[in-house]
Image: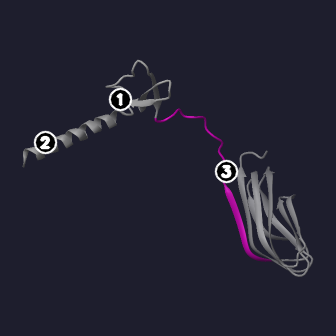
Amino acid sequence: MSKSLKILGVGIVMGMGFGGIAYAAIPDGAGVIHGCYRTNGDLRVIDDTSERCRNNETGLNWNTRGDVGPPGPSGSSHAYHAASAVQVVEETLTTIVRLDVPAGNYVVSGKMTLFSDPVGASCLLVAGASELDRTVWTNDNTETISLEGTTQLGSAAALSIQCASVSKSEARNIQLIAMTVDTID
């Protein structure tokens, strides 16, 4: 092996060693990054084991990991879902989808496509015995409708979508979703 190739190999090994030392020292063993800044905004990161700030610089240290903050709100913890492909909507108020849920605070959403001929329908979103939302549909063709509401249930109850039609209609792709929340403002 030639002398110049040996020197090159030793140089590469030494360079890798020094690079590993510099890399390991920033941040330091406690996770702190050390730096120096000047009043004009210049900032340089230093390895405080071998460097110090100059006379015209001020030291600045920061952690790669900040202090632990206070815990945030817990957010939604449960989602409930009920669906039905097709239901016939009669002239009397009929439950077309139902979801039984435990006590709690809920955001409730319902959606369906109504097919009516010739007059239309009326649909309610109900929690227990309370009406959360209502829609009246008077078209004589296809319509996608949505119902939304919030409720505070002191005990287990049924959430449902109930519809009635002037003449026999059909509801398809019926979805009812309820999500628990900590509070309702």
Residue 95 is covered by the magenta coloring: no
Residue that carries the numbered disc 3 in the rendered image = 76
Q: Secondary structure at mark 2?
A: helix
What mark, if any, has residue 47 been given in the picture?
A: 1
Q: Identify the amino acid type marked 1.
A: Asp
Q: Nearer the viewer, mark 3 or mark 2?
A: 2
Tell me which secondary structure the magenta stretch mostly adopts: loop
Q: Please indicate whether residue 78 sits to the left or right of residue 92 in the image.
A: left
Residue 103 seen in the figure: no
Between residues 66 and 175, which one lies in front from this camera angle?
Answer: 66
Work out whether 120 lies above or below 160. below
Residue 75 is covered by the magenta coloring: yes
Q: Position of residue 11 (x, y in %)?
A: 18, 40
Callout 3–callout 2 Cβ contact below 8 Å: no
**Spatial CA span between label 1 and label 3:** 46 Å
Q: Position of residue 29 (x, y in %)?
A: 37, 31
Q: Position of residue 170 (x, y in %)?
A: 81, 78
Q: Please indicate whether residue 53 sits to the left or right of residue 13 in the image.
A: right
